[in-house]
Amino acid sequence: MAAPVSTRLFKLVKESELRVEVGVEALFRLRLLSGTAEIFGTELPPENWVSIPPRQKFAVMSYFSSYLFSARFLPGMGPPWKWKVSARSSTLQTSYVNVHAVIDGRRTRAKASSSSDLVASQGPRVIVVGPTDSGKSSLCRMLVSWACKQGWKPMFVDLDIGQGAITIPGCIAATPIEMPIDAVEGIPLEMPIVYYYGHTTPSANADLYRALVKELAKTLERYFSANAESRVAGMVINTMGWVEGLGYELLLHAMETFNANIVLVLGQEKLYSLLKDVTKNKPNVDIVKLHKSGGVVSRNPKFRQKSRGQRIREYFYGLLNDLSPHSNIVNFSDISVYRIGGRPQAPRSALPIGAEPVADPTRLVAVNINQDLLHLILAVSYAKEPDQIISSNVAGFIYVTDIDIHRKKITYLAPCPGELPSKLLIMGTLSWSES
């Protein structure tokens, strides 16, 4: 029996939006009949159906009157999707567009400067900050997509290890964006620069988080110095939602490390005031307060955990299960697994009387291969030697599906066939279950 289909015609007046939350098992289809509309800064193609996968939350924004024809498919029970049309009075999209215009002006001025002057020709470095569920990721997507529509090729930087906008959770990453981000497929992964932190909270190893942020920043500085086009386009940086205590300290560290000169604060007056005060002697840094969109949906810890699992699944199987990962077997002796941090810097006997040994957060520790690796996500490092692991980005990830202690073999899932590009693997606490 065919799944029931429900259709609906929406009319969006000037500067209004349609907010949609797709259910766990549902498939939502959307078609633009007339006018213009966009999702996260990317225009919808006229007359073409766009299929939105399950578990997606998005808003269709129209700056002129538009007609949208939607169809929903109901493969399961329960409400498959939620929707709400928001008028101009309750949307902040226009203020976001105005911010983009200011950023675009800075890019234009940077391009007009001498290309040999690395300081004058440096485009805007925008960092988006705010508490959890304030719309940071969505705003970042809009800003880079709008920039691409103007012909720029900005760098998108993701420091949110909890969700992973570029690749799987547990990573900090960056990638150049050359075209508006596809509303369905998301951020392209042709040229990502990825460092594996291995945990979903910075409190697991804050010093390692800082070290990897520095490594990514150094890599991008080298990239910008050699690429004038990217340098004038600048970067847009997404951050974590932890903005108090250690989270606030790491936020300040990121601002300084990436030399951010535009700070967009979403949804919290206290954070705005703190950042205004801490940057009062830095006239080249602009702190801009923005209200969070009314379309932002709060996500509980259980939902976030499911989202992390879904992101990992998408890495191996694709957003629409259109990829075919490969199962491979390797001998224990053919790989070396390391974790970062843990063991004390010195034995207790070597310390002064009464002193306690302190774990070294950036110490590289060789891991004995055993059942503890089962269901873990391991990163494949580009490092040539173990002491280069922290300073090296990663080629990709594997998922450990079986450990045969007797035969000394590991079975793992990889996104592509063939041998691993490196025998040096990094483990953290990030795990996954296919079931």
Image: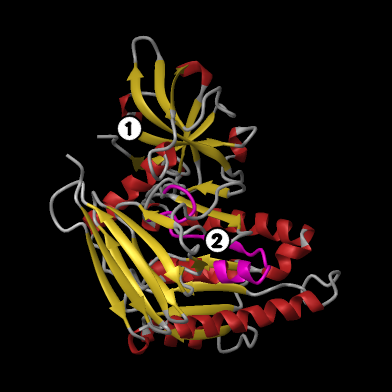
Q: Secondary structure at mark 1?
A: loop
Q: Amino acid at mark 2?
A: Val
The answer to whether mark 2 and mark 1 are in CB contact below 8 A is no
Q: Is residue 352 above or below residue 372?
A: below
Residue tagged 1 = 375
Callout count: 2
Going by the picture, which residue comes out furthest to the top? 407
Image coords of residue 322 (percent x, y): 42, 37
Compared across the picture, whether 2 is left or right of 96 comes to left
Q: Which residues are magenta?
A: 145-168
In this picture the colour scheme is: secondary structure
Image coords of residue 75 (percent x, y): 21, 46
Going by the picture, which residue comes out furthest to the left? 77
Residue tagged 2 = 157
Give residue 268's mark: none
> Gap between marks 2 and 1, in whole Å?
28 Å
Compared across the picture, whether 310 is left or right of 252 comes to left
In the foreground, 252 or 184 = 184
In the foreground, 427 or 19 = 19
In the foreground, 100 or 199 = 100
Q: Main secondary structure of the magenta part?
A: loop
* Residue drawn where x is 43% and y is 81% of the image: 65
Image coords of residue 104 (percent x, y): 64, 78
Using the rendered view, name the quadrant where residue 175 is placed: bottom right
Q: Amino acid at mark 1?
A: His
Q: Secondary structure at mark 2?
A: strand
Counting residues from the start of the chain, the first of labels 2 and 1 encountered is: 2
Residue 296 visible within the image: no
* Residue drawn where x is 78% and y is 58% of the image: 226
Q: Is residue 52 magenta?
A: no
Q: Is residue 163 magenta?
A: yes
